Image (cartoon, grey):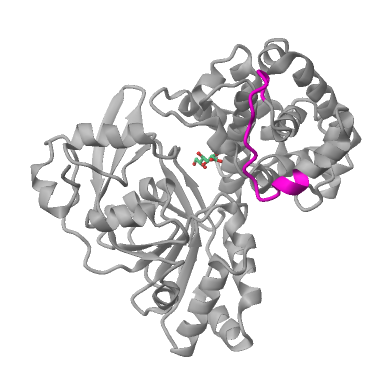
Amino acid sequence: MERLTNSVLKRLPGDVQVPGERPQTTGVLHLGAGAFHRAHQAVYTDDTDWGITVAAPRSREVIDALADQDGLFSVATLGPDGASMRVVGAIADTVHIASEHERAVDLVAAETTHVVTLTVTEKAYRDPAGVPGLLAAGLARRAARGGPPLTILCCDNLPDNGKSTRASVEPLLDPVTRAWAEEHVTFPSSMVDRIVPASTQATYERALGELGVTDLAAVEAEPFTQWVIEDDFAGPRPGWDATYTHDVAGWERLKLRTLNGVHSTLAYLGALADIETISETLALPGAEEYARWLIAEQIAPSFTPPDGKDTVAYGEGVLERFHNPGIRHRCLQIAMDGSQKLPQRLFATIHDLAEAHVDLDLIALPLAAWTRFCGGRSDDGAELPLDDPLKDVIRQSLTAAGGNPAARIDAILGLHQIVPETVADNHQLRRAAAKWLRELDRHGVATTLEHL
Ligand code: CS2
């Protein structure tokens, strides 16, 4: 079957949006070739005259597909009222970090690289041998050459993600590079948002149907897209149509606690109830009502939203997006890496509520749901995969705790690597979570939600 390449662009159906002139230079080096990058930063860059070199840390699947397609791929935007197709031409080159490490280091150092963007998932920042090590090696080379300033822009769902990225790289720098970096490198924070499920066979089939050629790097996404970036660039940047601000922290909190917090909550509840997607989970009797209460009574009072924003109204928008039937976002995909996601999505909220002496009953339910999910069995007794870097310690602690709900909650709250002491020691939270876990064990998710 013919592939999506430059030579077929002119023959694509008229309703497919195609790129104009392809970029000649790649001022952006992007680390992480996942679906989210392709449907988010790559689309923003496609609307500018800059190009991207995309670097894949481990798997070569996506970059091989891109290389076979002259860097082209399609984004299907799936709204409640139909779909539209766009071919993105911003990716000009690819690099495989695992097998071309030297070249990747050189790209970080290259004077033509002005911005390094990252979507490498939460856990990657804890692995000095991985992405932080690559950035450190690249900065050392750049400093040694007296290269131009560089902006390192994190686009992962972490709080203060610029600071977190800096903190993962800085300890790896020698004193000379560190001094140079202080002058020449910035790490702005950013809040990124677009729902982009992992591509499946159905994604590739849809692309083939719409384009008439095969696209093995195709992605599907919702219509909504947002990018709020801290205005702290060390040098030139592409003309991304983003919001530039000096206070990104409020935006990050709003999105992480509301969208991602409710996403993870629904993902664990849905997975336990043997439901495949978020939109199907939200359709369970009681689920949407619960999500609304959670947002209004627990998430909203936990922080001050950015200027002019109302968390409850924002939450309504989020729930509407979650309902989008065109997006089949699997609960098990979102359930992955809970230990890396829940600190900023759930524990930070609990911490702030506890400080403000707000009752913690409703927010104890996601904690109970995650605890039961980590036990590995759904309400129907099906096996649930625990895909998490802390899998071994989680399973060991739960096994040691036995069947008692209170002991299992204590085992999870005892994960001091991820649970702040103020949360772990909160008596009211422990009691409420144990109560919910007992309910979930006895009656399952569907009945628990129905009788809230
Ligand atoms: C999701 C996010 O997989 C997950 O954990 O919560 O990927 C979510 O879809 C995005 O952050 C939306 O911007």
Does residue 297 belong to the magenta stretch? no
Q: Is residue 204 left or right of residue 406?
A: left
Residue at left offset 79%, top offset 23%: 436
Please state the total of marks drawn on the protein image.
0
- The percent position of residue 196, horizontal first and vertical second, equals 43, 39
Q: Is residue 377 left or right of residue 225?
A: right
> Would residue 14 be seen by someone viewing this image from the given angle?
yes
* Res 353 → quadrant: top right
* Res 355 → quadrant: top right
- The percent position of residue 389, horizontal first and vertical second, equals 66, 50
Residue nearest the observer in this picture, 394 or 348: 394
- The percent position of residue 346, horizontal first and vertical second, equals 70, 39
**Above or below, comparing residue 382 to residue 244 in the picture:** above
Residue nearest the observer in this picture, 165 or 354: 165
Q: Which residues are magenta?
A: 378-394
Q: In the displayed orientation, state which residue is furthest to the left.
A: 11
Q: Quadrant of the N terminus?
A: top left
State whether the magenta stretch is mostly helix, strand or loop.
Answer: loop
Q: Quadrant of the C terminus?
A: top right
**Above or below, comparing residue 144 to residue 383 in the picture:** below
Q: Is residue 114 left or right of residue 268?
A: left
Residue at left offset 51%, top offset 56%: 120
- The percent position of residue 396, horizontal first and vertical second, equals 80, 44
Residue nearest the observer in this picture, 222 or 209: 209
